[in-house]
Image (cartoon, rainbow, N blue to C red):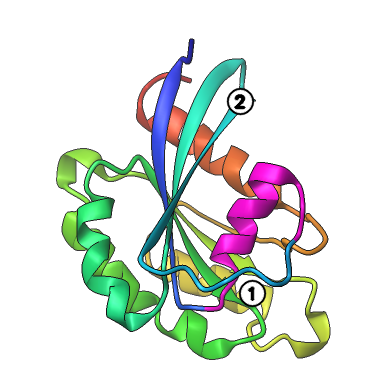
């Protein structure tokens, strides 16, 4: 029996690490050879946050432009979202507004679900093109609910990303 079931969408440009983030969270394994997501991928994971047993339905959205038309129908009914960019690829965060326009069109006034900006591939320090400060400033200027950097390769902040979002969704649903 679950205290809550939440639908989480993960979106952002192709190649930013959305699928490896979801896989690392689900299996605690890093697969460097993950295939491009065609359309949408769906996974389920249970976790306990603040004493509440929560089931997350994780919708991993293919980042290629040709799949973007699918996003609005998956945003409907979502309880939380992760916009993911690659810290070693500046253009992936430069496209945040393109993604936010699509998502915000579907986020109704009565369901302003929490959104986090997630900087992936934080282990690629030598190839970094987006500083943490810049990521934080971009997130703040878009009015999202938080910012975190993580590495699916090392596992750094992977669980914290989903736990933080879950905590915000519990607060949003008045369950915490």
Q: Nearer the viewer, residue 157 or 41?
A: 41
Residue drawn at 51 percent across, 24 percent down: 54
Q: Answer yes or no: is residue 132 visible.
A: yes
Residue drawn at 78 percent across, 56 percent down: 156
Q: Position of residue 75 (x, y in %)?
A: 27, 52
Q: Position of residue 119 (x, y in %)?
A: 61, 68
Instruction: Report how many numbered discs are placed on residues in the image.
Output: 2
Q: Residues within 10 Å of mark 1 (few under 14, many from 20)?
A: few
**Residue labelled with disc 1:** 133
Secondary structure of the residue carrying tag 2 is strand
**Residue labelled with disc 2:** 49
Instruction: Check residue 158 for magenta coloring.
Output: no
Q: Quadrant of residue 63?
A: bottom left
Q: Residues within 10 Å of mark 2 (few under 14, many from 20)?
A: some
**Left or right of 97 on screen, residue 145:** right
User: Marks 1 and 2: CB-CB under 8 Å?
Assistant: no
Q: Answer yes or no: is residue 160 visible.
A: no
In space, the residues marked 1 and 2 are separated at their CA atoms by 28 Å
Secondary structure of the residue carrying tag 1 is helix
Instruction: Check residue 18 for magenta coloring.
Output: yes
Residue drawn at 40 percent across, 82 percent down: 95
Q: Which residues are magenta?
A: 15-30
Dominant SS in magenta: helix
Asked if 128 appears above or below 109 in the picture, the reply is below
Q: Position of residue 147 (x, y in %)?
A: 56, 59
Which mark lies nearer to you, 1 or 2?
2
Residue drawn at 55 percent across, 78 percent down: 15
Asked if 162 appears above or below 142 in the picture, the reply is above
């Amino acid at each position: 029996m679950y205290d809550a079931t939440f639908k989480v969408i993960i979106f952002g440009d192709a190649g930013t690490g959305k699928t490896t983030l979801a896989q690392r969270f689900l299996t605690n394994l890093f697969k460097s050879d993950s295939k491009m997501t065609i359309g949408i991928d769906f996974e389920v994971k249970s976790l306990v946050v603040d004493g509440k047993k929560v089931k997350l339905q994780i919708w991993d959205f293919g980042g290629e432009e040709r799949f973007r038309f699918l996003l609005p129908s998956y945003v409907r009914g979502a309880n939380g979202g992760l916009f993911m960019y690659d810290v070693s690829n500046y253009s992936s965060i430069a496209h945040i507004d393109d993604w936010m326009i699509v998502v915000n069109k579907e986020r109704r006034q009565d369901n302003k679900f929490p959104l986090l900006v997630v900087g992936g591939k934080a282990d690629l320090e030598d190839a970094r093109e987006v500083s943490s400060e810049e990521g934080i400033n971009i997130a703040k200027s878009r009015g999202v609910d938080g910012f975190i950097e993580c590495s699916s390769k090392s596992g750094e902040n992977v669980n914290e990303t989903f736990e933080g979002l879950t905590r915000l969704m519990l607060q949003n649903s008045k369950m915490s």
